[in-house]
Image: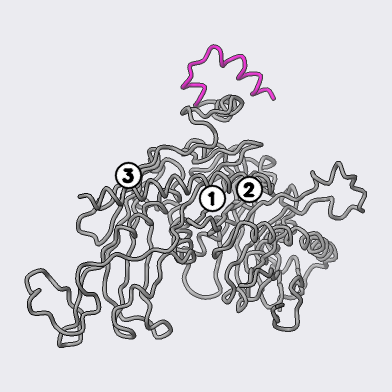
Amino acid sequence: MDIERAGGRGANQLRPIDCFRDVLSRAHGSASCSQGETRVLAAVFGPKAGTKKNENPEKACIEVIWKPKTGQIGKTEKELEMILKRTLQNICLLSVHPNTTTSIIVQVVHDDGSLLPCAIHATCAALVDAGIPLKSLAVSLCCCLTESGQILLDPSKLEEQKMKAFVCLVFPSSVNSVLPEESTPATTKSTEQEIITSLTHGVMTVDDYFHCVEQGRAAVAPLSNILKKKMRSQSAGNAVK
Amino acid sequence: MAAASGTNDLSSEMELDAFRRLFPLSFHERHLLESIRPDGRPLGRARDTSLSLGAVASANGSALAKIGCTTMLAAIKLEVMTPTVEAPDEGCIAIDFHMPPICSPLIRPGRPAEVAPVISKQLSDTILSSGTIDLKELCLVSGKAAWMAYLDIYCLDADGALFDAALLSAVAAFSHLQIPVVSLNDDGRIVLVSEENGGSMKEKEPVNKEKIKLKMNSQPFSLTCILHKNYILADPISEEESIMETYLTVVLDTNYQLVSLNKPGGPGLASTSSIQDCIALAQKRVKELQQILSEAISDMEVD
């Protein structure tokens, strides 16, 4: 009944995640994040003066440029840029620097599944490296659904293509996740993490979707701790492999 | 906030239109407190929707969909092509979404809208992954010839909920699509069979008798909702979308399975209960749209 995954991974097991900050010397902030074989490099420039034409000048503007590993920029890249931009609009404090533009360039180094979560982690680390004011970090997870209804977390590219459906979720990485468990029943409702971004692909039942969200929420707390630890223990000048 | 107390003083003196332009968020929130929207709709109701099939006479299938003021024109043209080696008995669908400058004052010629390629990609993902069209039905001669369907959707008026209207017009155009009769002539090429040479039919006719319609499995229908504080507004207009920026699009098919749930970030967060409310609103909308689509199809057949 249980699906065999490559490398003997369990259904709830994530691939090893690694995050390096300050990998580029010219950018105001930069980070490289890898989840298994997937690697993404992110660079942040800004805040620069002025906003683009149709944007609100009373807030900071975020501009995302997504560069694929190969090929020309097409609709997929535009969609990913929009998703990343709107996700960052949620976590950045936009009123601190009004009438400025922060540019974020995301370069895909290798895509082996879970590309958007890896890009979000790299971008958050790059924003931290650049010192852009953030409300919270974002932590993200991809899960896919097999024919039998089993949920697998963090699929690789092969698994994504074979599965019937997959869901990508982004949650805010709240402070509560690093505090010890003192939550009383009265406050447990308020600590239920709400979703910043949710994308699905493929047909699934509504109940399957909510199961994926529950699994995602459960897996996000340890993932968020790992990422914060990686970001904290950093020395400058780590080599880009 | 100073602005809020300022609006309370000014709102009694100011004209309605001026208040709407200067303090759009307070204007809408005053309406939301009464559970109503500026155009008089309750929060969960979508705008009046109408569908008209066969709007483009020269296309193989077409439809014009209007949700409130948002207008989308979809047309399908078929062309014969050789199928790929990996899928020799499947046809192909190419979906493209255009926003010409006629649709909105924010779009200028030579500067394409940012939202157009995004909606185009979302539409093709939704239609292809929902399995509503079986590509094997577009096959003519396995390995040699298959239909390539070019679906083009033009936005004629952009007034919010663009994805919903575009998906509705695409589904309607596919339900109107009539595949022409073709035959294989001596050179091994596919030619259209016209009415005159009906007597001298060649052998090996893949599509026989009259023009056939494409069989569609469960069709996808969508609903976009705006999440603002504790309110959920279904089917926003463009003014509401620009002020309250967090939206969520739910696509359900006629079996009430979730084809796509798209919440692309935005300043607000979505809790599980608000997602469940949006899905419930989408389920009601699927029933309404199915009804509208079947009425439009039966109107066509009467003609």
**Residue A154 place in picture, x, y as percent:** 69, 70
Is residue B131 rendered to the left or right of residue A112? left
At label 3, counting other C-alpha atoms closer than 10 Å, the crowd grade (few under 14, some 14-19, many 20 or more) is: some
Magenta-drawn stretch contains B8? yes
User: Which portion, as a residue range, is magenta?
Assistant: B1-20
- Say what secondary structure mark 2 lies in: helix
Callouts 3 and 1 close, C-beta under 8 Å: no
Magenta-drawn stretch contains B198? no
Q: Earlier in the sequence, mark 3 or mark 2?
A: 3
What amino acid is labelled 1 in the image?
Thr
Is disc 3 in the same subunit as disc 1? yes
Q: Is residue B92 above or below residue B56?
A: below
- Say what secondary structure mark 3 lies in: helix
- Please tell me in which quadrant of the rendered image residue B243 appears: top right
The circle drawn on residue A229 is none
Q: Earlier in the sequence, mark 2 or mark 1?
A: 1
Q: Most extreme residue toward the top, as rendered?
A: B13
